[in-house]
Amino acid sequence: MFGLDTTVIAIILLAGLSAGAVAYAFMFNTIANERKAGRRLDEVKKAETDANVVKASRDRLAEAAKRRKSVQDSLKELDERQKAKDTRMRKPPLKGQIKQAGLSMSVQTFYIYSAIAGLFLAIATFFAGAPIWAVPGALIAGAIGLPRWVLAYFRSRRVKAFLDELPNALDIIVRSVKSGLPINDGVRLIANEAQEPVRGEFRRIVEAQQLGLSLPEATLRMPETMPCPEAGFFGIVIQIQSQAGGNLSEALGNLSRVLRDRKRMKAKIGALSMEAKASAAIIGALPFIVAFLVYLTSPNYIMPLFVTSTGHMVLGISLLWMSVGIFVMKKMMNFDI
């Protein structure tokens, strides 16, 4: 009986295995297709993930390229504006020159002072016993040359004082920005506490903001009253930071370092060219020294230059050629940085 049950159980197991094998044989293709479909689905998902990664990377690159193009366009536009302002800065009208010199006079007042200086120099030349043809020359020199030379002197002195103080002002703005204050507060601090002429220039920026201009627009107007490239650099940095963003304190810190390096380079070039300047001064003064010594030793020998028409002509031609030589030497010794 036990043997019969074992045989029946074995038959049942064999029948089940046979049925399972037959079912597997019939469903093999289905299972294989499902596995292939699963692998294909995984590949599709992976491809979609890779595509998303590539798309995100492409979007980042496009955004970076767009930002770079925006910065380049801004730089190009600012460069064009700066060139136009440099042209106006090199050859400003008389009213602009007076403002750049830091003088509070009108153009009419300047012309009055020029006429007074011309008349005074002409009268002094006449009573000094100079030839009559020298009086109109003195009048022109006193009315046109001397006032404009004085104006140029005041402009250059004011620019030098501005460049000496500007890096310190930028450092104060950098520290105020790093401490959490907005840049407008730093500008107002300079407008109230800095030395002239930096205080006056930053006060103009604050006043322009009160009239409705933005900070970049107000800073870009600084070269109109301060004729130096460094003032334009400050406006360009503020303009780029407002359009492209970035670390303002780092940008202003770099600008301050650049300005100090430019100042150091100018001082180094001045020291290296001092020997040439001394030589030019000696060469320029040598004819006058020799003429004075000759006058002390042999006055009758040199007096014909001052009392005869031929001597006057020789003196005029000599002064003209000396002026040309001094002008050429000055151009050779001046370096733009």
Image (cartoon, helix red, strand yellow):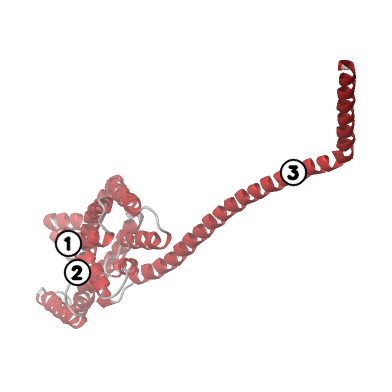
In the foreground, 296 or 335: 335
Q: Position of residue 126 (x, y in %)?
A: 12, 77
Tell whether label 1 touches label 2 (CB within 8 Å).
yes
Image quarter of the N terminus = top right
How much space separates mark 3 and mark 1, taking CA atoms? 78 Å
First-in-chain label (2 vs 3): 3
User: From the viewer's perspective, is 223 left or right of 109?
Assistant: right
How much space separates mark 2 and mark 1, taking CA atoms? 10 Å
Residue 312 visible at all: no
> Which element carries disc 2, helix, strand or loop?
loop
First-in-chain label (2 vs 1): 2
First-in-chain label (3 vs 1): 3
- Total marks placed: 3
Q: Which mark is residue 102?
A: 2
Tell whether label 3 touches label 2 (CB within 8 Å).
no
Q: Which residue is pictured at 21% across the width and 67% down the height?
A: 203
Q: Residue tagged by mark 3?
A: 38
Q: Is residue 64 above or below residue 223?
A: above
At label 2, which amino acid type do we have?
A: Gly
The 10 Å Cα crowd at callout 2, few under 14, some 14 to 19, many 20 or more, is some
Q: Which mark is residue 196?
A: 1
Q: Is residue 122 above or below residue 165?
A: below
